[in-house]
Image (cartoon, grey):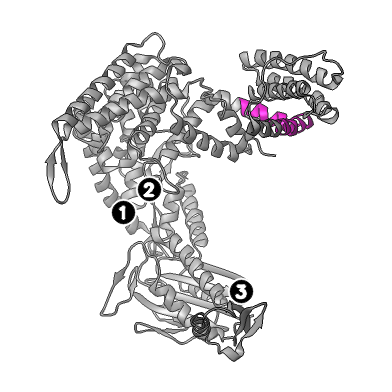
Amino acid sequence: MPQLLIELFSEEIPARMQAGAARDLERMAAERLKAAGLAYEALTTYAGPRRLTLVVEGLPSATPDRSEEVKGPRTSAPDQALDGFLRKTGLTKDQLTERDGVWFGVLSSTGQATTAIIPDMVDQIVRGFPWPKSMRWGSGPLRWVRPLKRIVALFDGAVVPFEIDGIHSGYTTEGHRFLGSGQPFTVRDFADYRAKLEREFVLLDVADRKLRILDGAKAACAARGLALVDDDGLLDEVAGLAEWPTPILGDMDPQFLDLPPEVVRLSMKVHQKYFAVRDPATHKLAPNFLVVANVEASDGGQALAAGNSRVLSARLNDARFFWDEDLKVGFDVWNDKLKGVTFHAKLGTLHDRVERIAALAREIAPLVGADPDQAEAAARLAKADLASGMVGEFPELQGVMGGYYARAFGHPDAVADAIRDHYKPQGPADTVPTAPLTVAVALADKLDTLVGFFAIDEKPTGSKDPFALRRAALGVIRLVLENNLSLSLNAVLWRQELRAQVSAMRVKLAAPRRASMDDIVDMPPNVLEKLRAELKRLEANVQWLRNDTEDPLLPLENYPDEAGLKVFFADRLKVLLRDQGKRHDLVDAVFALGDDDLVRIVRRVEALDGFLSTDDGANLLAGYKRASNILRAEAKKGDVPTGMVQTGLPGQPEEEVALAFAVGAAGTAVDAALETEDFAAAMTALAGLRGPVDAFFDKVLVNSDVAEERDNRLKLLGQVRDVMGRVADFGQVGG
């Protein structure tokens, strides 16, 4: 079947926009072909520095003829309804048929040639393309990321003629700006197009460009006994900068290697798009760099490498200046600057945030095996580098530079490591800190973020999460689980919310004037007094927290329930466990018990998962649901009887007696197992109920006509539900 080839050739497309542009082109073309009724075998898009390409295989030469029955108004409807239907469909009354008191008509359309559809499709795509940024040129209204120069439009080897703002479609394109012949050339189909582009030094597919970069870079490094420092993000970017990428190894001044390696690498990457190079024997950076050129130089790239070396030296001299100047300043000055930096308009300054993090880190420290004094000290230094010159130039180095500066100023290695790594983990692929001091500060940092933004009602909604709270919650969960920390989540959240409320109240009192577009009014004195009284109460509670030194985190029952954040953590835990292949409903079943120890929750979920995967577990779950349904139906009629189950009643079925004794034994065993947190043993105890429950439902009529028998059996089912409910809320379990 015929092939469609479209190329949109322009001036340079920014590398960061190319992957998205390829996806958008694929989506827009697929949508329009589907809307036109054109099926196809394959649709592929390509994006490069100067062109977007679409190739569609297996398109029919025309759309099929179509016939569709449409339903009109009832025959008894007013004439106006029928007239409206006829206008809408273009039919006449004599073309309608009546069926069951309703008018029906048939809309027919003759198939349309594909070549008649393509011009409008391309025009819509070009005019509606969702570039992040676009521009106009000349006098026309057309907008594109950069001036659009040519349009190739071929269907079944022939040009599809059309014009968009003076740009006429054709079969002519261009090769590499410098290495190519310099002359436009014609193409017949996609295979011819791709082959001729490569002869003109253009690699159409970004995968081919990446492969050429990696192969050439590794070969250049290996020739000098060096190794390339992998950087997938940089590879993606430089593959969008060159149509014929040519890696060239250059030399840099070795004196710059006394700078932190992260500074050297980031200077290369951000400013120059260079790859770093390392010594494979020491794994340290080598005094070299690798630049990807868009030309093949006659001298092997020596002059180009030398020029880039001079530019890199200038960049690294800037980095050295920031490093030297920062070492003259230090943490006290930086922390003082944080007092003037707003963290959030409702939560105060970065200095306020540091105070909250430091207090929480001190409380968490004993629970993770860290020294409280060191944890507080590290937390007070953790955000200081945000005011440093180096982090101002390279925000990506926050934390990292703080660690280097801490060592330079003589702080212990553990403190420096905590400052460096307290942002971790920042994503699912990031490593989780294990050093106790780092864990304490990292937990305090993420928990303060979560509590603070929940306190001011800045929660994630749908796909929007501007403050990365989902990532922070997942970071807390991974820190707790991978370090096996027994931590009362509710206690931590409640205590930190008190501090967040104090910060928010201080912000209100520091800005007593409220402005709008129309007027500015002073806050009424009575409102100010109420705020001051509330602040005084909150600060008294925070002072109590400071004095509570013997047991930094009291048991769960001493704190109000932080329901909103607990649900949020439950959702994040479900995501994590689902990725590990576990069922999300089991998380709900365990969370419903009110437990807030994440490690214990996961152990319960794992034990429950194992239990339900057995025949005993699956059948007992069915029995639980049957018992719950009976009890729920009885509750709608009135009170469900509770109390001690009687045995030895006249004519009492032996299955009823057996279940009563089995429930009592299971309850004792379950309680003992839960006391020692042996959740597998608790599940084993429940498994013992499977046989008696099955036998009871098989042989015993619960809704007996004898009231005493009925009440006794309902009490027994209530005890079954109660014993099982001590392990998990089985009502939350699906299946």
Residue 76 position by quadrant: bottom right
Residue at 35%, 17% (x, y): give it: 374
Q: What residue appears at the point 47 percent right and 36 percent down from the top-left corner?
A: 568
Residue 258 coordinates in the image, percent (x, y): 31, 34
Characterize the local packing of mark 1: few (<14), some (14-19) or many (20 or more) Cα atoms within 10 angstroms. many
Which residue is at the far front?
A: 706
Q: Nearer the viewer, mark 1 or mark 3?
A: 3
Residue at x-position 79% and y-position 14% = 647
Q: How far apart, in angstroms, are the residues tagged by discs 1 and 2?
A: 9 Å
Main structural element of the magenta stretch: helix, strand or loop?
Answer: helix
Q: Earlier in the sequence, mark 1 or mark 3?
A: 3
Residue position for label 2: 289
Q: Name which residue lies at 31% across and 41% down.
A: 395
- Which x, y percent locates residue 325? 19, 34
1 and 2 marks in contact (CB < 8 Å): yes
Circle 3 residue? 40
Q: Secondary structure at mark 3?
A: loop
Which residues are the magenta region?
604-627
